[in-house]
Image (cartoon, rainbow, N blue to C red):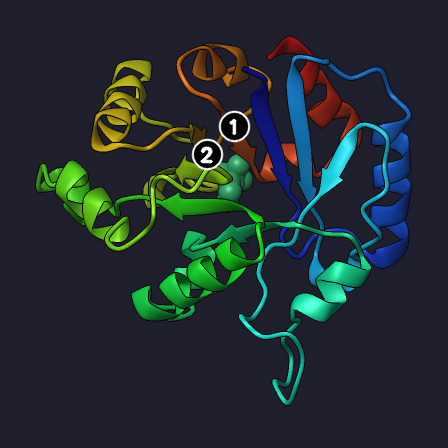
């Protein structure tokens, strides 16, 4: 099975620099054993017609179109041929995107056959309280784990953007427990960089990368060592 490497550009890069980034990365020789997905900012989305890259969206609203100020819906994504979506990222959960809206989005985009990357992860208090597994399973409640286009991204909140990661043993244990619970594909995200990418990808189905994906040359190096 191909490993999955996802670059989450968040609110970085402008429309012009995103276009350059995507064309530059797409023209490089990239590891064929990896599926590379890039999630540009909403304002910088381009049609998903690259040779080696799959373009996905960082978030969307579960509607076709309509009176939803500031949101984008399915009609826009269909025209851009985008059928990959990230859901439940901790930065959105922090903005008060809650369980029921995430579930609604999951079901809507599942019904439209999207590839769904669903982020789950514990905060520092759950970690210190020894309640990681319990908390992660709560975030998977009512999610159809048999959906074939589902990828679960394990991203501890305290590891995102902090430069700190769990140990390999801790990551391996969580991934293993998720698989026992019925998750088919489980990737890791949170402070992945050129130094730790290889050892982490070896024990997971892939990586979700924020900061270290912003520079296309650095990101290509990660794809190629993974
Ligand atoms: P990071 O972000 O790699 O900068 O920690 C990961 C993410 O937010 O998905």
In-image side of 91 versus 142 (left or right): right
Q: Is residue 94 left or right of residue 44?
A: left
Kindly identify the residue that appears in the image at 60 percent across and 28 percent down. 5
- The N terminus appears in which quarter of the rendering? top right
* In front of the other: 81 or 166: 81
User: On the rendered image, what quadrant is the C terminus found in?
Assistant: top right
Q: Can residue 224 be seen in this view?
A: yes
Q: Does the residue labelled 1 lie within 8 Å of ligand 1?
A: no
Asked whether mark 2 and ligand 1 are closer than 8 Å, the reply comes as yes
Query: Which residue is nearer to you in this view: 82 or 200?
Result: 82
Q: Are marks 1 and 2 in contact (CB under 8 Å)?
A: yes
Q: Is residue 194 left or right of residue 95?
A: right
Percent from the top left, x then y, of residue 61? 56, 71
Q: Would residue 172 appear left or right of 113 to someone viewing this image?
A: left
Label number found at residue 207:
1
Residue 133: x, y in percent? 17, 37
Per the model, the C-alpha gap separating discs 1 and 2 is 6 Å
**Crowd band around label 2 with a 10 angstrom C-alpha radius: few (<14), some (14–19), many (20+):** many
Can you say whether 189 is above or below 204 in the image? Answer: below
Q: Name the residue under label 2.
A: 189
Residue occupying the point 65% across, 54% down: 57
Picture quadrant of residue 76: bottom right
Q: Percent from the top left, x then y, of residue 45?
A: 78, 56
Q: Residue at x 70, y 56 (%)?
A: 41
């Amino acid at each position: 099975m191909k490993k999955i490497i996802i670059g989450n550009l968040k609110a970085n890069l402008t429309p012009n620099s995103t276009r350059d980034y995507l064309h530059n990365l797409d023209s490089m020789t990239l590891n064929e054993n990896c599926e590379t997905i890039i999630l540009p900012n909403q304002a910088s989305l381009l049609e998903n017609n690259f040779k080696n890259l799959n373009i996905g969206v960082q978030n969307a609203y579960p509607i076709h179109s309509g009176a939803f100020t500031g949101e984008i819906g399915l009609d826009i994504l269909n025209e851009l041929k985008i059928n990959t979506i990230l859901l439940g990222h901790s930065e959105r959960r922090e903005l008060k995107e809650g369980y029921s809206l995430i579930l609604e989005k999951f079901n809507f985009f599942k019904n439209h056959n999207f590839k769904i990357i669903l982020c789950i992860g514990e905060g520092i208090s759950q970690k210190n309280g020894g309640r990681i597994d319990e908390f992660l399973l709560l975030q998977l409640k009512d999610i159809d784990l048999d959906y074939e286009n589902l990828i679960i991204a394990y991203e501890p909140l305290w590891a995102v953007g902090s430069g700190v990661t769990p140990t390999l043993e801790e990551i391996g244990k969580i991934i293993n427990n998720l698989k026992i619970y019925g998750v088919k594909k489980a990737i890791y995200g949170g402070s992945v960089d050129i130094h730790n990418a290889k050892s982490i990808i070896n024990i997971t189905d892939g990586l979700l990368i924020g900061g270290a994906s912003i520079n296309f040359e650095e990101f290509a190096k990660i794809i190629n060592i993974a």
